[in-house]
């Protein structure tokens, strides 16, 4: 049985990342599905194990890889930093912790690109600390796109009942209409179709949302639907993609959650993430589509209010690792 190697990045060591990783890896189900290898700071994980009170022990790998049959109760860690106490204060990320986050992400990407790792799953980072360390990216997605040489990439948020992909990601609402172009909408539909077909389901059914209320109401509330979105959907259909739209966002999600569609292409961040998090607040997974590697992530932030308490839920982290493993198995089977 093929057991994929999943590189798991610690995220912000002053947030909940190390704790939720430890909690996720305490679930014996994951050890049966994959070979987890954590990239991070030994001190942060020794502390996380103590905080969670779980029967876990840390094993440092250095240049080794986890065994094909991981030992239950072991967190296999490749150490990439040695942060002291001053850089591990909960809720107070530093330049050094920002650099440690960056190192983990770049090493995970390197392992995946080289074929050593089959996929990567990431814990949440602090984007300000990343930037203060000299790495100027809005987040994981843009950094990984550069590391993998990817120009066209799409953020997908996924759960058992709903998957959404985004035409625009972290943008001010005032900028969104100008960024919703024919090329960008069509590229999002194409990437959504390609990677859903590759990793999840053949011939996925894709719903494409309108930008404006009631699909613009015949131009009364905006004309992007007729001028941009509908032509992009028509072009996608001409390529054999099962896409429909533009559809009104205020009703579409009910039908998508009931199983009428395999993914919903959304025009902006909150249009897609509000319904996704309503249904999958604890177990949502962030997947970057369009990359040559598999990358999943938690669908939440660093949760400084919970860091160090042992109360942070690991549901999303476990779901991200599980999805990364499942995608890697499908990719391996298709070789």
Image (cartoon, rainbow, N blue to C red):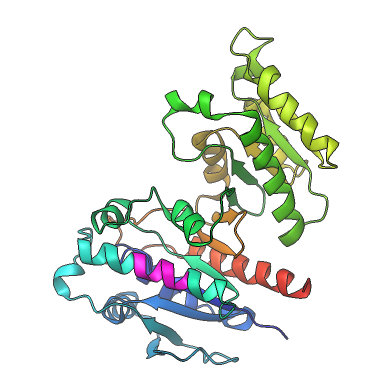
Front position in the image: 59 or 281: 59
The answer to whether residue 335 is visible is yes
Left or right of 290? Residue 298 is left
Q: Give the main secondary structure of the magenta stretch.
A: helix
Q: Quadrant of residue 285?
A: bottom right
Q: Quadrant of residue 322?
A: bottom right
The answer to whether residue 310 is visible is no
- Determine if the magenta segment contains residue 98: no
Left or right of 152? Residue 194 is right
* Quadrant, the N terminus: bottom right
Q: Position of residue 223 (x, y in %)?
A: 63, 14
In the current view of this chain or complex, which residue is farthest to the top?
A: 220
- Determine if the magenta segment contains residue 103: yes
Q: Total number of numbered labels?
A: 0
Indicate whether 71 appears above or below 20. below
Which residues are the magenta region? 102-108
Indicate whether 304 appears above or below 46. above
Q: Position of residue 219 (x, y in %)?
A: 65, 9
Left or right of 283? Residue 263 is right
Q: Residue at x 73, y 69 (%)?
A: 330
Indicate whether 51 appears above or below 225. below
Q: Residue at x 78, y 71 (%)?
A: 334
Q: Residue at x 60, y 80 (%)?
A: 34
Q: Position of residue 163 (x, y in %)?
A: 64, 47
């Amino acid at each position: 049985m093929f057991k994929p190697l999943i590189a798991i990045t610690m995220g912000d060591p002053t947030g909940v990342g190390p704790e939720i990783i430890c909690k996720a890896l305490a679930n014996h189900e994951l050890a049966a599905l994959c070979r987890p290898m954590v990239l991070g700071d030994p001190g942060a994980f020794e502390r996380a194990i103590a905080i969670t009170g779980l029967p876990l022990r840390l094993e440092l790998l250095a240049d080794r890889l986890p065994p094909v049959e991981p030992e239950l109760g072991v967190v296999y860690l490749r150490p990439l930093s040695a942060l002291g106490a001053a850089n591990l204060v909960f809720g107070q990320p530093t330049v050094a912790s920002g650099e440690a986050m960056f190192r983990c992400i770049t090493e995970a990407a390197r392992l995946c690109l080289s074929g050593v790792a089959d996929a990567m799953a990431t814990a949440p980072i602090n984007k300000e600390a990343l930037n203060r360390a000299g790495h100027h990216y809005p987040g994981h997605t843009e950094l990984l796109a550069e590391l993998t040489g990817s120009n066209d990439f799409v953020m997908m948020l996924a759960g058992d009942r709903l998957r959404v992909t985004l035409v625009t990601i972290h943008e001010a609402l005032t900028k969104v209409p100008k960024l919703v172009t024919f090329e960008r909408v069509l590229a999002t539909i194409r990437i959504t179709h390609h990677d859903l077909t590759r990793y999840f389901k053949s011939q996925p059914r894709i719903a494409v949302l309108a930008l404006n209320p009631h699909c613009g109401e015949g131009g009364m509330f905006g004309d992007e639907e007729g001028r941009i979105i509908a032509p992009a959907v028509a072009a996608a259909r001409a390529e054999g993609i099962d896409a429909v739209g533009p559809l009104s966002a205020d009703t579409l999600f009910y039908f998508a959650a009931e199983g009428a569609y395999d993914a919903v292409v959304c025009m902006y961040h909150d249009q897609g993430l509000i319904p996704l998090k309503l249904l999958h607040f604890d177990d949502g997974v962030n997947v970057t589509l369009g990359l040559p590697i598999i990358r999943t992530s938690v669908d939440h932030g660093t949760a400084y209010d919970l860091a160090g308490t042992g109360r942070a839920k690991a549901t999303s982290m476990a779901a991200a690792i599980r999805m990364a493993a499942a995608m890697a198995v499908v990719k391996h089977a298709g070789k």
